Image: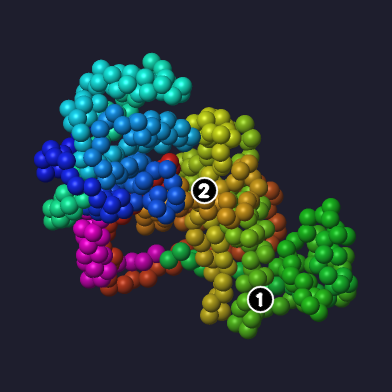
Amino acid sequence: MTIRFLYGRRESLYGKSETFKKSVRGYLESIGFSQTVDSSVEGSFEDMIFFNPQTSPGKKYIIEAKSEVLSPRTKKLARELIKYFRLSRKQENKEVIGFLLFVQGVKKSKEWESIFNEIDNIEAVQEWCDWYNNKCIEKNESILDEQTVKDLSTFFSNSEVTVGSHIDLQQAVLEKQATSSLSISRTAKNLFDLVNRRKSPISAKSKITLNILSITIPEYYYDCKSLANSKQEIYDDLKETILPPFLFTSDKHMLTFAEFDNDNPLKKFMVEPSSIMNTKELQLQNPTFCSELVNIHFRRILWNKGLYRDPKANIYYFPMIDEDSNIREVIDQHGRNRWVVKEIIHREDTKYHKKGDVNFFFHRGVELRTPTYWGFSFVEMIPRRYYTLNGKNWIDGEIRSRIDKRFRNPKFDRSKARLGLMKFWKFFMFESQKFALPSEKWFDKFQFGDFLTKNVNWSPKVVGRSQMILWDFKGDELDA
């Protein structure tokens, strides 16, 4: 890009390497950069690696700090510049790289300016490369070809050299911190003040919509002594039969909301006629057991709706039905198509995949619980993002977490968007009469209410969609 001289064009005194690096670090932080790698810690070839999320989100800056007075025609420096050039071209994920060189002083400043000129530096770079090639020939080493010279010209024009001693850098830091809105310390203070201003709600009435809705469960459940010694014994015997959901107790009782009539396969294991039990008593006397009974029946309803379930995370999600499609849509509460599964592909060639290969599948999911409070049953729901590798089978939570880091964007997790997803799930699970599998007789005994609301005398302060956060979101963004 260009070459800058801090506080005049002069050669500074030598300083210790780490002292100089510390001054460089402070200077970069004063203009909004944040460090991620240090050669003194990680042992990397690069002196330091920085990011600037406010001015150049996603761009990685490689920093080289030289506490020396240098000539551009120094073989050691030339080797390092060539190595940085080649390093910048080897990035497998095609990330954007910037190179910043800090030196304490320079010799032949006119040549430095010509080489790192951002407008027309090809002639100067050609002369520099001729010098470098001659040195390589003397040592019987590989030389730079014509195309590499052209690419080097572009690399140098996009790079930046800053000249100044550690004292110059420290002085610049003091001046930047006093005026720059990008400095880390100033940004942190502004964010702290902002949080303090917003931590208290506004004194205005509002209505809170909870992610909880009431349900009316069947008035009675059925209890029957079983011939089997375990639930697995029943499954093994009736493995070709669709069984109604049921709990199996330690004293060999079967409990279900499905009547033990002639259509119920469980009747085969009845020891005596079933007892009709009042569900309200169970809700009051044993709410945990009641929640478990409701939950296993609820899972059957959602399975018949066509949802898959991750048993470890307790998340229900839409599977990809058509293997030849890259997206699946369903009708939402407004009668419009809403995507529920998307195929995410590799956008570039990588070491293990080619551009266009399937990376993973992005699913709309929902985490559900069926608690019992104060003698009443409820459904708690939390809309979730879910991921699979083949569009159907659930995967390990650690793999999902690594994928999910790409999509954590506050812009798409706001109250309005979350409420819209909650209403969509409520419609699909409880209001729509469309089933992937035939409904069962006891389904109609469940009635689902609306989300619970609460009127309060305060309101949260609205944060605009453009509100900046400390670290900008990086990665692909998907619509909510």
Q: Which residue is mark 1?
A: 289
Relative side of 478 to 192, left or right: right
Q: Quadrant of residue 359?
A: top right
- Tell me which numbered mark, 2 or 1, is placed earlier along the sequence: 1
Residue drawn at x 62%, y 31% as measured from the top left: 324
The magenta span reads 180-209
Residue drawn at x 81%, y 79% as measured from the top left: 251
Q: Amino acid at mark 1?
A: Phe
Residue drawn at x 56%, y 48% as measured from the top left: 387
Residue 119 — which label? none
Is 268 in front, or is 150? Answer: 150
Is 138 in front, or is 331? Answer: 138
Distance from Cα at disc 2 to Cα at disc 1: 36 Å
Does residue 284 lie above or below 300 as drawn? below
Q: Which residue is mark 2?
A: 403
Quadrant of the drawing holding the N terminus: top left
In the displayed orientation, state which residue is furthest to the bottom: 285
- Does residue 193 show up magenta in the picture? yes
Label 2: which secondary element: helix
